[in-house]
Image: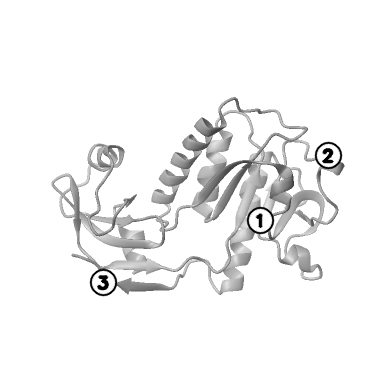
């Protein structure tokens, strides 16, 4: 079943799997950009774990397979970061989505933040579009949650939170239960957080021996989280999928 996702010519998100209908933007992308031909395979997902195989026919989707339901991961992983300059926020959200992060959190400005959005909702809407497009490319059937702007205090209080810091302990260390249980990594701005911004009760984890740019740190944090989740669950690539009969 997973091979059908990987091998489809395109993957899209729709509101209803019983009668998958494309948005104008997605229809244009498939017909004008990808130039699909009638009969080519397209997978459609509702973004909540359900998906099915369709075929491209006369500019729309025709159902060609039963609905398959993929269970949500037993362990959600998340990354929070302070917005940075330019298009690097979009790049970060794109890559976090491709890697498989479930919760992408944009932090409210901290003391060393350089970027302070005047219209946060507009920026978040743009980033959610980026996440959706990246999830299509990555053949995800669960859309990530992109939220913000969340205060640092609230992010630190989230279950499994840990702060990325060069002075922190090794990410894969097993001698510290708090670090081993971390599944939500918080990345600070260039220069990091001030000492009094982070509670001593929150564990710190190292992402390596070098000094990373903020957007690079988000990518490394996501990769480490995904790798550890894959090891804990047996594999990062296999899911429990059950076919569910749906209208054809």
- Find numbered disc 3 in the image and state the secondary structure of the residue it sits on: loop
* The N terminus sits in image quarter: bottom left
Q: In this rendering, which labeled residue sits more in front, label 2 or label 3?
A: 3
Q: Which residue is mark 3?
A: 245
At 63% from the left edge and 50% from the top edge, which residue is drawn?
79
Q: Which of the labelled discs sits on residue 184, or is there none?
A: 1
At 80% from the left edge and 49% from the top edge, which residue is drawn?
166
Q: In this rendering, which labeled residue sits more in front, label 1 or label 3?
A: 3
Q: Is the residue under label 3 in contact with that under label 2 (CB below 8 Å)? A: no
Q: Which residue is mark 2?
A: 194
Residue 225's place in the image compared with 194, above or below, is: below
List x then y, in percent, for residue 101. 55, 54
Q: Earlier in the sequence, mark 2 or mark 1?
A: 1
At 60% from the left edge and 46% from the top edge, which residue is drawn?
105
- Find numbered disc 1 in the image and state the secondary structure of the residue it sits on: strand
Dot 1, crowdedness within 10 Å: few (<14), some or many (≥20)?
A: many
Q: Earlier in the sequence, mark 1 or mark 3?
A: 1
Q: Earlier in the sequence, mark 2 or mark 3?
A: 2
List x then y, in percent, for residue 218. 64, 46
In this view, the residue farthest toward the left is: 58
Dot 3, crowdedness within 10 Å: few (<14), some or many (≥20)?
A: few
């Amino acid at each position: 079943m997973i091979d059908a996702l990987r091998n489809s010519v395109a993957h899209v998100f729709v509101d209803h799997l019983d009668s998958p209908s494309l948005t104008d933007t997605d229809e244009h992308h498939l017909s004008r950009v990808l130039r699909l031909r009638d009969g080519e395979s397209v997978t459609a997902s509702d973004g909540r774990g359900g998906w099915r195989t369709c075929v491209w026919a006369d500019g729309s989707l025709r159902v060609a397979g039963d609905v398959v339901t993929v269970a949500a991961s037993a362990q959600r992983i998340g990354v929070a970061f302070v917005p940075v300059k330019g298009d690097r926020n979009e790049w970060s959200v794109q890559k976090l989505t491709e890697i498989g992060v479930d919760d992408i959190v944009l932090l409210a400005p901290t003391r060393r933040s350089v970027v302070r959005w005047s219209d946060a909702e507009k920026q978040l809407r743009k980033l959610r579009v980026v996440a959706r497009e990246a999830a299509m490319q990555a053949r995800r059937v669960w859309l990530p949650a992109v939220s913000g702007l969340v205060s640092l205090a609230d992010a630190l209080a989230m279950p499994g939170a840990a702060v990325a810091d060069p002075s922190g302990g090794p990410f894969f260390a097993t001698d510290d239960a708090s670090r081993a249980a971390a599944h939500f990594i918080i990345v600070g701005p260039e220069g990091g957080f001030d000492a009094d911004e982070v509670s001593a009760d929150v564990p710190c984890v190292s992402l390596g021996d070098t000094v990373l740019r903020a957007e690079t740190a988000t990518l490394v944090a996501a990769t480490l989280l995904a790798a550890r989740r894959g090891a804990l669950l047996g594999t990062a690539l296999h899911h429990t999928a059950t076919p569910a009969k749906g209208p054809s």
